[in-house]
Image (tube, coloured by chain):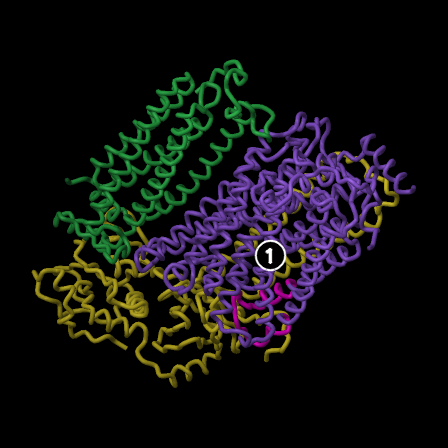
Chain colours: A yellow, B purple, C green
Amino acid sequence: MKSTFPLFPDSASSLSSHVDALYIIWALVSVFFTILIAGLIVFFMARYRRSDPEQVGVEERAAVWLEILWSAVPLAVMLAMFAWGTRVFFQLYRPPVDAVEYTAIGKQWMWKVQHPEGQREINALHIPVGQAIKVKLASEDVIHSFYIPAFRIKQDAVPGRYTSLWFKATKPGVYHLFCAEYCGTEHSRMIGSVYVMEPRDYESWLAGGSGGKSMVASGADLFTSLACVSCHRASPGINQRGPNLEGVYNSQVKLADGRTVTADDNYVRESILNPFAKMVAGYDPVMPTFQGQVTEEQLTQLIAYVRSLGPIGSAPAGGTGGTPAAGTAPSTAANTPQTPGPAAPQK
Amino acid sequence: MDTTAVARAPLGTPETAYERPSYLNSEYGWKSWLFTLDHKRIALLYLISVTFFFALGGTFAAIIRLELLTPEGDLMGPDTYNRVFTMHGIIMVFFFLIPAIPAVLGNFLVPIMIGAKDLAMPRLNLASWYVYNLGGLFTLWAIVNGGVDTGWTFYTPFSTTYSNTYVVPTAIGIFVTGFSTIFTALNFIVTIHRMRAPGLSWFRLPLFIWSTYATSIIIMLGTPVIAITILLVAAERVFGLGIFNPKLGGDPVLFEHLFWFYSHPAVYIMILPAMGVVSELIAAFARKKVFGYRIVAFASVAIAVLGFLVWGHHLFVAGESAYSATVFSVLSMLVAVPSAVKVFNWTATLYEGSISYQTPMLYALGFIGLFTIGGLTGVMVATLGIDPHVHDTYFIVAHFHYIMVGGTIMAYLGGLHYWWPKMTGRLYPGFASKLSALLVFVGFNLTFFPQFILGYMGMPRRYWSYPPEFQVLNVLSTAGATILGVGYVLPICYFAWSLKYGAKSGDNPWGAVGLEWDTPSPPPTENFYTTPVVTHGPYEYTREEVHNRLTQEKEASLV
Amino acid sequence: MSSTPLVDRHEHGHGGAHGHRHPAHQFDSMEQQKESSTLGMWLFLVTEIMFFGGLFTAYMVYRHMYPVAFAVASSTLNVTWGAINTGVLICSSLTMALAIRSAQINWRKGSMLFLVLTMLLGGAFLGIKAIEYHDKFVENHVPGNVLNQPFDFVLENAHEAAAAARVDPLYQRHAEIFFSLYFIMTGLHATHMIIGLGVLAVLLFYTKRGKFDSEYYNPLEMTGLYWHFVDIVWIFLFPLLYLLGAHTH
């Protein structure tokens, strides 16, 4: 499939042709201006070659219109390309609503990928063709960069925060996955493959894989074992210490200090690690921090679980019942996972 | 020796038994050099240091290209490779590209071009050379002990926490060298403001002075920021602080902002003096005033100012918000306008000129071509839709080498060839020098043009081994680098040769105008026997006296 | 400060040692030389502003990120010492200005006196700073792992600690960033003071030798500019570092 001497990368995502079009037009503009300049230089060199050692150039005639022309034309070309490029950029980084979320965690020197269904892979990513996929990125150590040339997309994985990118593969095949941000010794070995499969093949790959629990299920387990469930109960009312998380994800949350924020990945992450940084209005600050108690992977699983909690009433997972008695000191309750509660996470 | 490249034996240069007094023969002995306060001698000291670091950085480049001949990392281990490309970057950026034109050509020419006896602060000037070498020693010490592997960008937390190499001595080296750059820039600004010859108003200044002035402004405003940033990195490593360490609450992206706040303008520190040199060369070898002189002068200042507003384009995929990315993208394109204007003005200068094909002119014309490509691809990567794909790939590597090597080094070599007779009073072989210009141009394109294709195909930079389908282009690139290397070694040889064996150049071998050509070559210690009084702008080749002088020289050459 | 150029007296009794009446070889006139050094000094101060500017930027970013930790960490600094030091520095700026003034009116003794006073005040500032550093060291508030003494930030007031933890459970870790910046900013400021004291010592020596008078006091004036700049940096550092939090003690 791969030629031994290719000059142009595979184009395999819904947006790669947009990037290519932008690139090719820019390249043509560049070639035009380069040839214009080089051609003029060669022509002038030949035409005005010094014929006599005492010869000097003809005195300059001011030409304001020329200066204006060659300021305005490049400016106009660049602004047009800027507008087009920005349009493509926003397409590249705004995932569609139906995008399925995968997780990729960079670590010296590998990409640890987890599927929403729970499959884990290292330095490999199997995806179905035609499905919009959002990859949430995190890093366990230094800055890495998740790069799939065939999809014309790249995003740094920065330690301490989430970033993401999305793509929709359009052509089955095997494509490179690179780490593009220099990260140490084995930087050039932090590479892998993206396997774009027909949905049928993908299903059978999933079935054959050493699946493990789905992201959501693992998150639900954690939600229980870390005793999140004891405060963030689904049944509202009695002694509600923490907000019900159903329908919270991606909603607008009103904070104690009056601000409103969107409960996105970074917000949920921050609320787990640093609960009082952005407190939801109406609750006491009693939640302990989970900094150091959960790994990056577990964090993404927890977030996947929170995300899976749809609007109130349609919760797919447990979280009801089995709460500690009212009046227990909140901090103890939250810290002791001795009462996991009966609610088994649903599959 | 080919005499076509060099001018005829100029008027009034008899092969006399006695040597005219000049800065070169005013004093002898190593003390007279190491303790000199003469800007011209300091320029030559810098020339030696800078050439040493260029050779060192070039050696590292050669090792990189050798390793990349094959997809597997077979010449050396990954750790070695990482150190090699890091040292290549650090040495070339901080110890060659930034100081080269200002410290060598600038030091030599700024006082002469403005009709002054010396820079305003000669002691500071000499100190800057020592400080530069001190910084270089720190870095060399780090290299000898095993090097540093962070990349020249020192991204945190890799540099502060994860790297096991000599980050701190290297950081100190860069910190110290930063002072030498600041000293030089400060000296230039003061000198240009306060020491211009009578009648030399701002719009009578040569464009090299304008661009040096603009460069100095960037150095003064930018270098302190990299100094404090690199100091924070060192402190973080030594004391275990967490300013850029996310595990301790720090923010690695803040480092990227601080770093690029200097390091993007640093690109303009490299290219602006090169533009100034090219303006001089084009005017001298087309014997014509630079078209749109004032516009070109203001363009330098515009680039210096706008250059401080574009650093965020290095962070498009680093987690910067889409809206700041948009702003930085459009600002980056604005900075390209004055650059484009300069290219058009240089080209227009050739129109109806009297163009000679001497070596410096070949370098200058090569500069325009390569800078055009570097600039256009720069605007391409500032385009938001393209950058996510090409960021951190060989496309970027190719782009900035077109600016830094195709731009800065071409101009530096062009300037060196142009002012070599001024500095030494000697001529170099014409054929060899033209050959070197050709080799550099061809070798450069062969080295770096394939990297544009590699980059768009997705080959990330700083890769020690790579997928096999990238090999053909990498082999081409290495082949080009070989030619480029020969092109760089040639001038070193014939310049050294010319010092002893080169023909006497006479005062003005090019028939150029400018204050620097109104004084003997090499100039006397005090530059001018009498303080020049300036009555006209630069590059005025149509004046009667220029005509008369050229006619005289022609007649003399016919005798 | 305007100088009143008197008649050029370098003919009268100033021997060859007083070559400073002639401009240095690269200048045409004393005036050109003075203008050049003044411009050079101001440019140098611009680079200094950018140098500290990088630190102030980092400070702003982290203060915005961790307001509570910064406030409680700030509250453990000793405002009294900080305020005294502010006063000390302002006084030293005054004595510096007076030293220049004394040179302008040819009062050599006065110039020496005020230089010594400036140096004493500068030394006092550094002494107080050393006391504060020592306190921080004893309290284990030195960030990182200096001298094998890990950073350990415990608020004495339990109520205060609980209040901080309520808003920022990681306030201790974030306080470490505050102290990192505190030590780097005040440390660099102190380094500038020490360099300034060195320059003042040289000036004192030359003043004693009678090198400066109403015609030539440029080095004094330039050092004065530098000294005032260092003073102004402190004027920014003091409120940013010391006066952030509500001081409960």
Q: Chain of mark 1?
A: B
| Residue at image point 53% right, 78% down | A173
Q: Is residue B456 magenta?
A: yes
On screen, residue A296 versus residue B18, left or right, reads left
Nearest the viewer among B354 and C7 is C7
**Residue B305 seen by the camera:** no
The quadrant where residue B307 appears: top right
Total numbered labels: 1
On screen, residue A185 versus residue A225, left or right, reads right
The quadrant where residue C244 appears: top left
Q: Which residue is mark 1?
A: B54
In the displayed image of the protein, which residue is found farthest to the top?
C7
Nearest the viewer among A254 and B164 is B164
| Residue at image point 42% right, 67% down | A134
Q: Residue B274: x, y in percent?
A: 64, 47
Nearest the viewer among B20 and A25 is B20
On screen, residue C56 versus residue A228, left or right, reads right
Stretch of the chain drawn in magenta: B448-473
For badge 1, the amino acid type reads Phe
Q: What crowding class fits label 1: few (fewer than 14 Cα within 10 Å), some (14-19), or many (20 or more)?
A: many
Q: Residue A337: x, y in percent?
A: 16, 70
Classify C235 as above or below A96.
above
Q: Residue A346: x, y in percent?
A: 25, 76
| Residue at image point 19% right, 49% down | C138
Classify B140 as above or below C51.
below
Q: Quadrant of the N terminus of chain B?
A: bottom right
**Residue B486 seen by the camera:** yes
Q: Residue C119: x, y in percent?
A: 32, 31
Classify B405 as above or below B194.
below
Q: Quadrant of the C terminus of chain B?
A: top right
Q: Secondary structure at mark 1?
A: helix
Q: Considering the whole magenta stretch, tell me its main secondary structure.
A: helix
